[in-house]
Image (spheres, coloured by chain):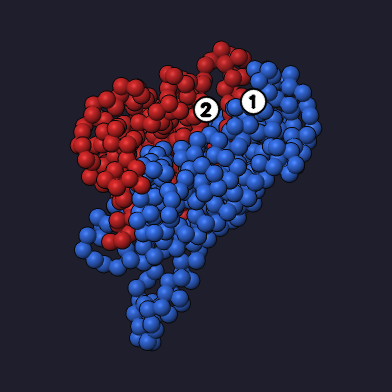
Amino acid sequence: MHLFIQRIKKNRIAYYLILPALFCMILVHILPMLWGFIISFTGLDLYTVSDWSKASFVGIANYLEGLNANSPTGGRFLRSLWNITYYGITVISMGYFIGLGVALILNQKFIGRTMVRGLVLLPYIIPDSVAYSIWRFMFQSRIGIVNKYLLSWGLILEPEVWLVGDKSIYAVMVASIWKGWPFTCLILLAGLQTIPLELYDAAKIDGASPWQQFRFITFPLLMPITSVLILLSILWNFNAFNQFYVMLGSDPGVAAEVPSTLILRAAFDSFHYGIGAAMSVVLMAIMLIFTILYIKKIRPGEAEH
Amino acid sequence: MIILISVLIPFFWMVSGSFKTRLEIQASDIKIPGKEPSWIPRNFTIDNYKTVNKEVKIFDYFKNSVIISLGTMFFSVVIATLAAYAISRFPFPGRNVYSITVLSTQMFPGILFLIPYFIMFIWIRKLIGLPMRDTYWGMIFTYTSFSLPFSIWMLRGYFNTIPREIDEQAQIDGCTKVGALFRVIIPLAKPGIVSVGIYGFIMAWNEVLFASVLTGNKTTTVAIGILRYITAQEARWGGMMAACILVSLPVLIFFTVLQKQFIQGLVAGATKG
């Protein structure tokens, strides 16, 4: 105990140094999270929002409504969870395959590699609202370029309406894959460059084919970085908002509804803050599982000096 | 080659759209021969650039975004440097808990605390009369806090690569621990600090969700402003594409100039423990 206090005293400056950061994080992350938890048990609405202590306590009513498949909000919320899962699986797996393929190409030496690498990163760099606005333009039914090619290749006979109705989620998927894979590629490329070349030389001497080299050297050695990457992508994609909001507006329709857009509307259009907060808490519980996995993967504790 | 084309197609479309007249875009129809949307504008015009600020006040939004992004950049660099130095060099009790908190807050996305945060803004205003919503500093504070976890994590990794002997030597030479940070560590970690700064700037420049709720007439950022070219009444695609180019420029310039450091920092921040 005495030693513990001594350690605190000896490192007193450290506490001053983290103070501003701690202040910001408590105010922006930690307090609102706890608060959100409290709000999710209240009937907070437009009339009580300026004095939240007056809001009625409703117990778990918000959760019951949010998770009840037969209520209007609950039905949409469950559907949105399904949508985001479907969207996430598609975008992450496609993004990973494209990213891996391109990373393998970029890992070879060829003329103009640096330039190509820079250009490939462009989609990742430009702002979300710019990227998805362009895609929204491209997916326009009659004036868009996407339908023009699909039509001329004979893949469709009549112009498709992409941004309203059942197909809208696919339009968003295409745009998100385009926007997301360069990051995957960048990380995988960094991973590839840490693999010692001697391993490949040894494999060649042993007569391994390029496929075998990939299968038994590249792929296993990329596994650690892959698992971190996939966890990160799950965390990011599960909360996708920008692409849906920019391409489809604040109400993307049932087929492309995602939790973020639903929560936003529940709170800021219908002013049911309580239900919105309850849905956030459910979402947070799901995310928590992946966060714990992620932290275990990169283990900050082991980086001790 | 195929990869490059598929990456670049939307950019070509953006540039081509920005030089088309409004009439050409509106009247184009994939079903009518001779009127299909084309890559090369039929009536080349720069009107979209001339009138980009006419109906949508994109220059005002631009100014707002510059102020908010530069503010975010400044504060997140300063605060993250101090905190990262503490984590990297002081074995203070609570360090592990703090590191894990930093790491996990980075994982929790905005939508999870948007509602309580918004209500907190209202509450602060009511309690101490301090307006937070639709103010520059409210937005700077929000975005600084968002960029902190990643920035601290990235810089911590950077500081850890600097041998401790160097700052120990500085202390023997009469520097205090804080002095060593400014005289030794910061100069050595310049690339890391630069990339943290860019990260903060880009993050604030691009953010959509909080901007859509917390900004108002006075502080609308470009990320939201750009969507205003399309309204229920009319679709100004040409103007929107011109604005898209304008809005991407600062980010693209930053990226081109500092590509190498930024990529290094990004990779390290996402994957290294």
What label does residue B216 carry, if any?
none
What label does residue A271 carry, if any?
1
**Three-letter residue code for mark 2:** Val
Element marked by disc 1: loop
On screen, residue B118 versus residue A59, left or right, reads: left
On screen, residue A204 versus residue A60, left or right, reads: left
Neighbours of disc 2 within 10 Å: few (<14), some (14-19), many (20+): some
Chain letter corresponding to the colour red: B
Foreground residue among A302 and B218: B218
Q: Is residue B178 above or below residue A240?
A: above
Identified at 59% across, 52% down, the residue is A85
Q: Quadrant of residue A282?
A: top right
Q: Where is residue B219 shown, x and y percent of the image?
A: 42, 22
Q: Where is residue A221 shown, x and y percent of the image?
A: 46, 69
Which quadrant is home to the N terminus of chain A? Answer: top right
Q: Where is residue B246 shown, x and y percent of the image?
A: 29, 34
Which is in the foreground here, disc 1 or disc 2?
A: 1
**Three-letter residue code for mark 1:** Phe
Identified at 40% across, 39% down, the residue is A133
Q: Chain letter of disc 1? A: A
What label does residue B213 carry, if any?
2
Neighbours of disc 1 within 10 Å: few (<14), some (14-19), many (20+): some
Foreground residue among A292 and A67: A67
Q: Quadrant of residue B52?
A: top left
